[in-house]
Amino acid sequence: MSARSLATLQELYRRAQSRLGGTPESGLEAKLLLLRCARLKEERFLAEPDRHVSALAEARLQRLVERRLSGVPLAYLTGMREFWSIHFLVSPGVFIPRPETELVVEQVLKLVTQTDGRVLDVGTGCGNIALSLARELPRFQVLAVDVSQRAVARARANADRLELSRVEVIHGSLFSKLKGRGLEGALDFIVSNPPYVSIDEWDGLEEGIKLHEPKRALVPGPTGLEFIARLIKRSPKYLKPDGFLIFEIGAGQDKLVLSLFDKRWKGVERVLDLAGIPRVIIAQHRGRRRSGRNA
């Protein structure tokens, strides 16, 4: 042991929790940061609270606590975010998954009637929607696309880590890289957690988001509806007749979003989140004959 006495897991945990605010939430954050720095699993932390921690790990923890206090999102500090009971790798420059987005996965699983099919995740980020669906639907072909090279790299890393090599992650904007792949009229589901924050809403977001998360993954344009409008307009070309488009929206956007659907769609409905806020839109493609101009 070094000249100075090394701190224990429990001591470092209490210090970090106090520094972060002393609340139950700060206790969870302190534990996650400590496990990251000490390179331990939670079981070891619980079983050996008096285990001494190296001075290097203690220094790492102090640095991460300071960065957390400066507003850096916890997920970027731990390198992980849980979604659909799966731990996803995340990193700066890639949007951090939110719990409410699990509603998109839930709705797909409720609507699936066959054992195999095709699903496309537009704006996949770290791959949380696409890879969660791939886990639940092992016979489905899953494709994911994102305009960000960082997001594509992270999604591919998550696919490898989860041993879901059959998921294809594509670098491109919307449907631009799907041309010539025989996917026109072939998809059972198109899913998305699109950027939907308006410029005015962006200005009011907390600093931790504005300073650290990628603006392009959140703000598509002045109104916040620009990406959604393109998604609704272009999806029919790739959906099967009666295929579904399922995507997340922002609070208070439902009426404006519903007004964007035309006669190519049927059964358009809203799904409420746990707070009773319309959070997900489901729309079914009518499958009418289309001219090239409508596609």
Image (cartoon, rainbow, N blue to C red):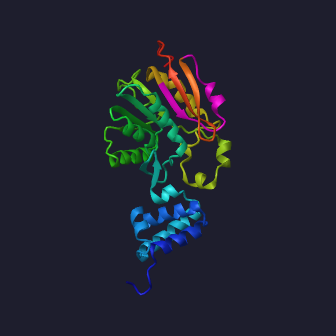
Residue shown at the point (48%, 36%) measured from the top left: 106
Given residues 231 and 26, the one toward you in this image is 26
Given residues 270 and 238, the one toward you in this image is 270
Judge whether 125 appears above or below 68 on screen: above
Q: Number of labelled discs?
A: 0
- Give the quarter of the image for residue 159: top left
Judge whether 55 appears above or below 37 on screen: below
Q: Quadrant of the N terminus?
A: bottom left
| Image spot of residue 170 (x, y percent) | 39, 37
Given residues 159 and 290, the one toward you in this image is 159
Q: Is residue 284 magenta?
A: no
| Image spot of residue 66 (x, y percent) | 55, 67
Most distant residue in the bottom direction: 3
Q: Is residue 174 visible?
A: no
Judge whether 292 appears above or below 160 on screen: above
Q: Is residue 4 visible?
A: yes
Judge whether 247 appears above or below 243 on screen: below
Residue shown at the point (41%, 74%) measured from the top left: 51
Given residues 270 and 42, the one toward you in this image is 42
| Image spot of residue 237 (x, y percent) | 46, 21
Q: Is residue 163 left or right of residue 52?
A: left
Residue shown at the point (66%, 44%) measured from the top left: 201
Give the magenta range. 244-263
| Image spot of residue 121 (x, y percent) | 44, 35
